[in-house]
Image: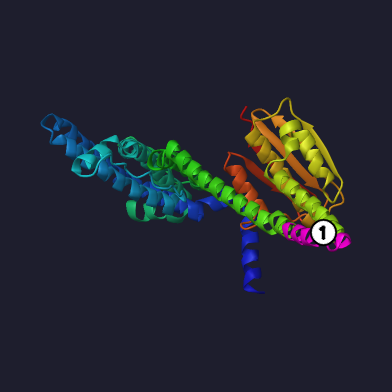
């Protein structure tokens, strides 16, 4: 058996064991237990630092010495965030990006102090240190006794002999009145009952730990990561870069089409007309034939310019909307296409244009790659979203992997808060759904 087969066999056996049985001995349980055990001493240290530093800084603000002390305390809180994000990444498998950097209004010490005091993430780090202490204490006090009691009760049949052999008692004492009376776990029924209760606690502990550390995940993500505003700004900056790159690529395409297509034809046309002018008097028949050829070149140049203009923004879309524009491109597809557009009114021109060119690209893929015999396009409105779907009965296997046309299309849709979903199993059929904001 190969190494791959042995690994697959082990994974198959692991899947046959229920999760509730595997959880107490699984790696996730021990990572989360280590997180809980480390959390209390770290939380105590961070709590003491934050309370002491902020109290001293705030108390001395009347002397103006407290202002830089308070700024320095907030700067130190960011170091707490670095440690806690690394601990959460290693033990909880929560990868939280660092917060946005401090923005300094001016250079020098005054700008540094002002930036620290105005930094929302620094204050959120301080709040995390304050909240993490009571929560870590509560988690520690719940998890450690639960874990210890579960394993000690489960293993009681193995070490029960210690009590009569070395303590002179029949078993583990549960209750005693101090006068020789009491309740001891000594009979086999009591011993087995204790082990069963211990087994229940052992099986329950991972899920309790998982639920409690889920709150830690929320604290780390909500207080130690970037704010929603900063995340949104980063997304918009990325989207703006995509839009700029797309616009630049479109301009290069238009320039190339003009240079290699209509412009080359017009240059050749000018040369042919010049030759025809020279031959007009000495050889009228040849000149007439050359003028006729030039007339044909004019028609071809006009057709290329018309196609180029349609690629920039078709007139039918501006004049008659998506229904007519999509019917027009469907008529030029190499396979029969059914078009159904159900919109109460037209969306804004920008979204309408993106929807049009999205369908154009998807139908082009159908013609080139799908091997389909029939396709369909549906456009409708759902709430505040414009939905469009292109389907075909081809061979399937379409994938929005990096570098493919679908990946670029998904990026362009994401730039306007859109979404592209590809459902294309091998053998077909393919169903690609795009979602755009309505933005009326």
**In the rendered view, does 428 fall on the left or right side of 40?**
right
Horizontal side of 114 relative to 208 (left or right) equals left
Task: Specify the farthest residue to the left.
Answer: 63
Is residue 193 found left or right of 116 in the rendered image? right
Crowding around mark 1 (Cα neighbors within 10 Å: few <14, some 14 to 19, many 20+) is: some
49 or 347, nearer to the observer? 347
Is residue 146 found inside the magenta-colored segment of the image?
no
**In the image, what residue occupies the spot 48% across and 41% down?**
208
Where is the C terminus found, in terms of image quarters?
top right
Instruction: Examine the rendered structure and indicate whether residue 142 appears above or below residue 367.
Output: above
Residue in the picture at 76% in, 31% down: 320
Q: Looking at the image, how many numbered discs can be counted on the residues?
A: 1
Q: Could you say where residue 298 lies in the image, as x and y percent from the top left?
A: 78, 52
Q: Quadrant of the N terminus?
A: bottom right
Q: Quadrant of residue 143?
A: top left
Q: Can you say whether 380 is above or below 14 in the image?
A: above
Residue at x 39%, y 38% (from the top left corner)? 223
Residue underneath mark 1: 280
Across and down, in percent, residue 428 comes to: 80, 52
- Secondary structure mostly seen in magenta is helix
Q: Quadrant of residue 60?
A: top left
State the extent of the magenta-drawn residues as a range.
270-286
Q: Can residue 159 be spotted in the picture? A: yes
Residue 84 pos. (x, y %):
36, 47
The residue nearer to you, when weighing 401 against 285, is: 285
């Amino acid at each position: 058996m190969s190494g791959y087969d042995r690994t697959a066999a082990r994974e198959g056996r692991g899947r046959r064991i229920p999760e509730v049985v595997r959880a107490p001995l699984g790696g996730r349980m021990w990572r989360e237990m280590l997180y809980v055990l480390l959390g209390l001493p770290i939380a105590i240290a961070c709590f003491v630092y934050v309370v002491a530093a902020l109290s001293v800084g705030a108390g001395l603000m009347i002397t103006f010495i407290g202002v830089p002390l308070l700024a320095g305390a907030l700067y130190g809180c960011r170091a707490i965030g670095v440690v806690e994000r690394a601990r959460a990444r290693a033990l909880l498998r929560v990868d939280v990006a660092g917060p946005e950097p401090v923005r300094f209004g001016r250079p020098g010490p005054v700008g540094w102090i002002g930036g620290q005091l105005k930094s929302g993430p620094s204050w959120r780090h301080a709040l995390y240190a304050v909240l993490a202490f009571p929560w870590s204490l509560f988690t520690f006090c719940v998890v450690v006794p639960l874990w210890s009691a579960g394993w000690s009760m489960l293993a009681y049949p193995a070490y029960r002999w210690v009590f009569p052999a070395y303590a002179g008692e029949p078993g583990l004492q549960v209750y005693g009145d101090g006068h020789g009376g009491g309740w001891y776990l000594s009979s086999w029924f009591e011993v087995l009952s204790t082990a069963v209760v211990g087994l229940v606690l052992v099986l329950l502990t991972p899920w309790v730990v998982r639920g409690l550390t889920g709150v830690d995940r929320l604290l780390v993500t909500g207080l130690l990561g970037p704010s929603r505003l900063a995340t949104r700004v980063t997304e918009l900056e990325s989207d703006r870069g995509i839009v700029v790159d797309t616009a630049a690529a479109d301009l290069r395409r238009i320039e190339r089409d003009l240079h290699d297509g209509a412009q080359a034809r017009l240059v050749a046309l000018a040369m042919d007309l010049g030759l025809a002018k020279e031959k007009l008097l000495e050889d009228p028949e040849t000149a007439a034939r050359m003028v006729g050829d030039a007339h044909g070149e004019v028609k071809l140049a006009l057709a290329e310019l018309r196609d180029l203009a349609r690629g920039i923004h078709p007139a039918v879309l501006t004049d008659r909307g998506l229904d007519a524009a999509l019917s027009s491109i469907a008529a030029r597809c190499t396979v029969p296409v059914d078009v159904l557009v159900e919109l109460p009114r037209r969306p804004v021109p920008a979204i309408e244009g993106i929807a049009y060119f999205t369908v154009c690209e998807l139908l082009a893929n159908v013609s080139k790659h799908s091997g389909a015999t029939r396709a369909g396009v549906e456009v409708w409105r759902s709430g505040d979203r414009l939905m469009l779907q292109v389907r075909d009965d081809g061979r399937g296997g379409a994938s929005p992997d990096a570098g493919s046309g679908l990946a670029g299309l998904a990026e362009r849709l994401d730039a306007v808060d859109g979404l592209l979903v590809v459902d294309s199993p091998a053998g077909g059929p393919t169903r690609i759904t795009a979602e755009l904001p309505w933005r009326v």
